[in-house]
Image (spheres, helix red, strand yellow):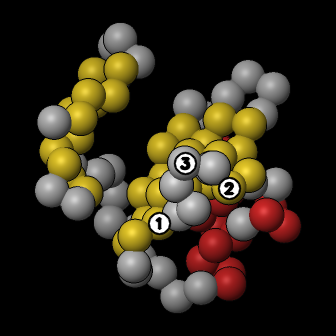
């Protein structure tokens, strides 16, 4: 991940962040699962393509839950709610 410009979070060694001029991507890893969150879908798609060239992976689409945490997206407000 570091070769792709991601910084490891100090608080969680399995969480990486990449900042762009006007957006960001957060990548969280847990065993064999990955959650990618970001403000720019084109950058997310580019990352998924890069990762799929190096690793066997499946894109399961938009997340509804991870680690027992439900994810609600309010696109009109740009808010991601976790519960």
- Near-viewer residue (55 or 49): 55
Task: Name the residue located 47 percent from the left edge and 66 percent from the top edge.
Answer: 29
Quadrant of the rendered structure where residue 66 is?
bottom left
Task: Name the residue located 23 percent from the left edge and 40 percent from the top edge.
Answer: 71
Q: CA distance from mark 2 to mark 1?
A: 11 Å
Q: CA distance from mark 3 to mark 2?
A: 9 Å
Task: Name the residue located 15 percent from the left edge and 56 percent from the top edge.
Answer: 68
Task: Name the residue located 64 percent from the left edge and 67 percent from the top edge.
Answer: 49
Mark 3 against mark 1, which lies toward the viewer? 3
Q: Is residue 7 visible?
A: yes
Mark 3 against mark 2, which lies toward the viewer? 3
Residue 26 position within the rendered picture, expressed as x and y whole percent measured from the top left: 56, 46
Q: Are marks 3 and 1 in contact (CB under 8 Å)?
A: no
Mark 2 against mark 1, which lies toward the viewer? 2
- Near-viewer residue (56 or 13): 13
So how many labels did they put on this image?
3
Residue 22 position within the rendered picture, expressed as x and y whole percent measured from the top left: 73, 22
Residue 27 position within the rendered picture, expressed as x and y whole percent measured from the top left: 54, 54
Please name the residue that numbered disc 2 is placed on. Answer: 8
Residue 16 position within the rendered picture, expressed as x and y whole percent measured from the top left: 62, 54
Q: Which mark is residue 11?
A: 3
- Near-viewer residue (77 or 70): 70
Q: Is residue 44 visible?
A: no
Please name the residue that numbered disc 1 is placed on. Answer: 29
Q: For label 2, count other residues whose C-alpha is less than 10 Å away and answer few (under 14), some (14-19) or many (20+).
A: some
Q: For label 1, count other residues whose C-alpha is less than 10 Å away and answer few (under 14), some (14-19) or many (20+).
A: some
Q: CA distance from mark 3 to mark 1?
A: 14 Å
Circle 2: element type: strand
């Amino acid at each position: 991940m570091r070769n792709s410009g991601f910084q490891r979070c100090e608080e969680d060694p399995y969480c990486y962040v990449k900042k762009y001029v006007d957006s960001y991507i957060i990548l969280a890893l847990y065993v064999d699962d990955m959650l990618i969150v970001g403000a720019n879908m084109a950058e997310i798609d580019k990352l998924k393509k890069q990762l799929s060239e190096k690793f066997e992976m499946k894109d399961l689409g938009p997340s509804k839950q991870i680690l027992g945490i439900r994810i609600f997206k309010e696109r009109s407000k740009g808010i991601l709610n976790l519960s």
